[in-house]
Amino acid sequence: MEEESKLLGENMSRGYDVILDGNGLVLGRLASVVAKLLLNGNIVHVVNVEKTVISKSKKSAVATTKARLEVRTLASQSKNPKRPKRPENIFQRTVRGMLPWKKSRGKTAYKKLRVYIGIPEQYSDVDLQVPSEAKPISSKYSPISMKDYAKIMG
């Protein structure tokens, strides 16, 4: 595990292309690692984003999602909150929430994020990095995958 963190630590300097594998990693923890890499000036590619997991029980994730989707406005329905429903958009929005979005530094960092479902052909022969900080810790809940969560969202 130390070797994997050191691998990511070497790429913390500016200008590197970092290719991360999201298979089995926790969504929020992976997003925080990605946000830090983006703020350091790296271009980050995240593959297998649909295989990331949310460390909640399925029942709890469904309840919070349904409650958020019921928020409406009495004015025009075009003004109601927009919620991402695809796995790559959910991940991008999570990372965006961890960046200083209203500053130019955050916007330029966000433009360097690339998210893919599955593994694209150009990255099939590349060694994918797995940050040890984003690995799940054993919990009493069985986590829900991002693919299942996106199906629930609609």
Image: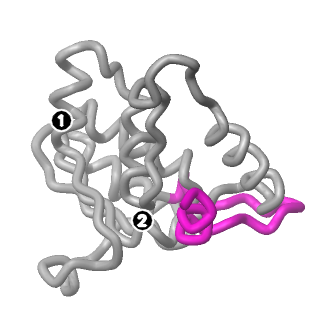
For this view, does 26 lie left or right of residue 82?
right
Q: Quadrant of residue 59?
A: bottom right
The residue under label 2 is which amino acid type? Val
Q: Residue at x 30, y 41 (%)?
A: 37
Give the vertical position of 93 relative to 101 (above or below).
below
Which numbered circle lies on residue 49?
A: 2
The residue under label 1 is which amino acid type? Gly
Residue stretch rendered in magenta on the structure: 132-154
Give the vertical position of 98 relative to 138 (above or below).
above
What's the distance in space between the residues labelled 2 and 1, CA to CA? 21 Å
Label 2 environment density (alpha carbons within 10 Å; few <14, some 14–19, many ≥20): many
Name the one closer to the observer, 9 or 153. Answer: 153
Of the two numbered discs 2 and 1 on the same chain, state the one appearing first in sequence.
Answer: 1
Which numbered circle lies on residue 78?
A: none
Q: Is residue 34 magenta?
A: no
Q: Is residue 150 magenta?
A: yes
Name the one closer to the observer, 140 or 134. Answer: 140
- Element on which disc 2 rests: helix
Q: Residue at x 32, y 61 (%)?
A: 46
For this view, does 137 lie left or right of residue 107?
right
Across and down, in percent, residue 101 comes to 31, 21
Name the front one of labels 2 and 1. 2
Name the one closer to the observer, 145 or 38. Answer: 145
- Element on which disc 1 rests: loop
Residue designated by label 1: 41
Across and down, in percent, residue 55 comes to 70, 55
